[in-house]
């Protein structure tokens, strides 16, 4: 029975949400699966990926073949690296502690990069809100400035007809 690690689509139209599953290659895309390994939500920025890394590594070691997208997600979360390091431990190139230390260092660096991106996005959003508020304040100030001189001009125009009326009365 050939096993694939692939995505199973959920969510509504236009808002996909995926489960990462180990499934028989002959089953339908959204059909039966052997084990749910995690979730992938591309609607968030950065995309949300939750994965049972140990379960994915177990399936990879037992011969499961990931699809292209699933392989990208497994690499993103470190399952492919952990599988590679486990192969090195089996061959004797590394000890279990060395492999775990390398994996932990990689995970920490990856989480730092993801957090930096999230912080950068929140900074961009805050800057955009501040710019929009400043533009709105400028528009409001311009509107107030345009409204303030108008009554002064009306007073001047009201005085002018009064003097004209007086001048016309004097002529008669």
Image (cartoon, rainbow, N blue to C red):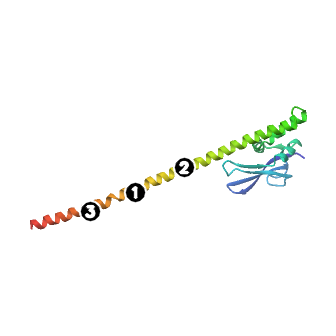
Q: Residue at x 41, y 55 (%)?
A: 141
> SS at mark 1?
helix
Within 10 Å of disc 3 (Cα), the crowding (few <14, some 14-19, many 20+) is few
Question: Which residue is identified by label 3?
Answer: 155
Image position of 156 (left or right of 57) = left
Tag 1 or tag 2, which sits nearer the N-term?
2
Q: In the figure, 145 relative to 62: above or below? A: below
Rate crowding at label 2 as few (under 14), some (14 to 19) or many (20 or more) other CA atoms within 10 Å: few
Percent coordinates x, y for residue 109 in the rendering? 73, 40
Alpha carbon distance from label 3 to label 1: 20 Å
| Callout 1 crowding tier (Cα within 10 Å): few <14, some 14–19, many ≥20 | few
Q: Position of residue 139 (x, y in %)?
A: 43, 54
Q: CA distance from mark 2 to mark 1?
A: 22 Å
> Label 1 near label 2: C-beta < 8 Å?
no
Q: Disc 3 versus disc 2: distance between alpha carbons?
A: 42 Å
Label 2 belongs to which residue? 128
Marks 3,1: beta carbons within 8 A: no
Q: Quadrant of the C terminus?
A: bottom left
| Outermost residue, top side | 93
Which quadrant of the structure image shows residue 137? Answer: bottom left
Secondary structure under badge 2? helix
Q: Are marks 3 and 2 in contact (CB under 8 Å)?
A: no
Name which residue lies at 87% across and 38% down: 96
Which residue does the numbered mark 1 point to in the structure image?
143
Residue beneath the point at 40% across and 57% down: 143
Q: Which mark is residue 19?
A: none
Q: Residue 148 at x, y = what percent?
A: 35, 59
């Amino acid at each position: 029975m050939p096993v694939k690690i692939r995505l199973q689509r959920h969510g509504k139209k236009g808002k996909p949400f995926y489960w990462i599953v180990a499934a028989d290659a002959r089953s339908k895309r959204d059909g039966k699966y052997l084990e749910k390994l995690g979730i992938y939500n591309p609607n968030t920025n950065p995309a949300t990926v939750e994965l049972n890394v140990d379960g994915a590594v177990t399936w990879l070691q037992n011969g499961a073949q990931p699809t292209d997208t699933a392989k990208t997600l497994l690499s993103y979360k470190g399952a492919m690296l952990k599988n590679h390091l486990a192969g090195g431990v089996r061959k004797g190139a590394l000890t279990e502690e060395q492999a775990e230390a390398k994996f932990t260092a990689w995970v920490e660096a990856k989480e730092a990069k993801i957090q930096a991106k999230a912080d950068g996005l929140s900074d961009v959003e805050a800057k955009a809100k501040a710019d929009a508020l400043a533009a709105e304040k400028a528009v409001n100030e311009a509107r107030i400035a345009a409204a303030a001189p108008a009554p002064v001009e009306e007073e001047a125009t009201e005085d002018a007809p009064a003097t004209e009326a007086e001048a016309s009365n004097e002529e008669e």
